[in-house]
Image (spheres, rainbow, N blue to C red):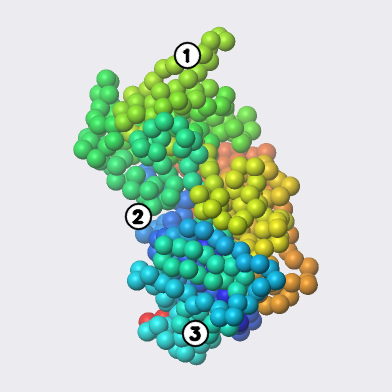
Amino acid sequence: MKHLVLVGGGHAHLHVVEAVAEGRRTGSGWTDVSVSLLSPSPHHHYSGMLPGFLQGRYTESALRFDLPALCRAAGIRFIQGTAQRIEVLDQEATQPPEAPQIQSAPQTQAVSGSAGDPSEAAGNGAPPDPGTGPTDFVVRGRIHTDAGMIPFSAASLDVGSVIGGREIPGVRRHAWALRPMSRAVELEGVLAALARGETAGVPGGGMGPGGASPVVVVGAGAAGFEVALAAAERGGSGSAPVDVTLVEAGPELLPEFSPRVRRRARSVLERRGVKLRTGCRVREVAADLVQVEEEEGGVRRTSSFPAALTLWVAGAGPPELLARSDLPLGEEGFFQVDAHLRSVDGAPIWGAGDCISLQGFPWMPKAGVYAVRQAPVLVANLRSALEGEEGEEAERYRPQSSFLSLLNTGQGEALLRWKFLVAHGRWPWWLKDWIDRRFMERYHGLASERGFGGS
């Protein structure tokens, strides 16, 4: 028996859960592996549908994954808690004299059996729950959490990233971050209140000099571009006007895209009334303004924008968990993995999504499309390692240089980039909406199944 702990409920780990469910249902794998998923929240939200949610086009349930239900369907133990540190044991001492049991705080939720009975789960094809069942699995490390200590044979990290620029004065206190996603979901209510002219819960108060509530979005990458347009649409749908300004430290909007895409994006911003200010580096964020530094004619000057609400979508930073753990880190502090998505030091820890740095590919962006492509490689290599097939050729992941991009521009339209094709209008939105809904239905369907030990 081996014990795999999935730390975080991100996109790649959803694919692992689905693979475990399928393997156990068909008897084709994962039948002698105990799996746990650790997450601070019982819900995970799909970032691809967030702009549509902020616009009011989707309900919150449409972009929400129910992690306990997904785990129940796969015969996986769900543990609600936050990882504080990952400890890797001496590789030579893989079996302590007494393998520790999972020590759980009251909020930890085991879902492997209808009444927590491991024998019931085992009878349905799922392995016994490691917290109450056998303690003879190989232990290679421990995860220290606010819900207790969890030993593991192998672990995988898909914990995302935190906002960049947190060291800038006022960002932590006054800026509205879109990470974690639960915070982004709360933003919808704030934008709706602004559109109604209600400012009691808005950090920077009420309307600006022109009678409109000023909203400043910091970061003009893909996410910032979509959020700025979503804020403009939501503001335009109510009785109170909203004035949106998109601020970027670099010289270009959408720096990761081609000049053709940027030109089309600028045109969309102009038509929707969103002001764009590039070359503006934020120096401080206050409750009601954003102070920036910009260069004009070789002279640096400081100015400020009024802000009833400052939305921070500027870059990504590594979660503090990584620095506190026994993990190799890249230059920017992210967990460094090799082409097999395994820790570069050979520890039995894998990773995917925004929390990793891929050896040899420092340019790889922090974007969900990469996590989705990493998922099959992660599943294959975790399964090989846990089922004693490490001698086989491991799957390798190579980040794609080109992929379909669909940016939600509001008003039922989207901006599409596919290789040399650039298009904007309703049909790209229909395509994006179809892809997103199909992705969600795939996991909503799994969560609705009775699964292993489900009630």
Tags 2 and 1 touching, CB below 8 Å: no
Q: Is residue 251 left or right of residue 48?
A: right
Q: Is residue 211 left or right of residue 433?
A: left
Q: Which residue is mark 1?
A: 301
Badge 3: how crowded within 10 Å, few (<14), some, or many (20+)? some
What amino acid is labelled 3 in the image? Gly
Q: Is residue 79 above or below residue 330?
A: below
Q: Which mark is residue 59?
A: 2
Residue ID at (74%, 72%): 390
Counting residues from the N terminus, which is met first, the one under dot 2 or under dot 3? Answer: 2
What amino acid is labelled 1 in the image? Arg
What amino acid is labelled 2 in the image? Thr
Question: Which of labels 3 and 1 is toward the front?
Answer: 3
Which SS class for mark 3? loop
Q: Which mark is residue 250?
A: none
Counting residues from the N terminus, which is met first, the one under dot 2 or under dot 1? Answer: 2
Q: Which residue is mark 3?
A: 133
As measured in the structure, the alpha-carbon distance from the residue carrying label 2 to the one carrying label 1 is: 43 Å
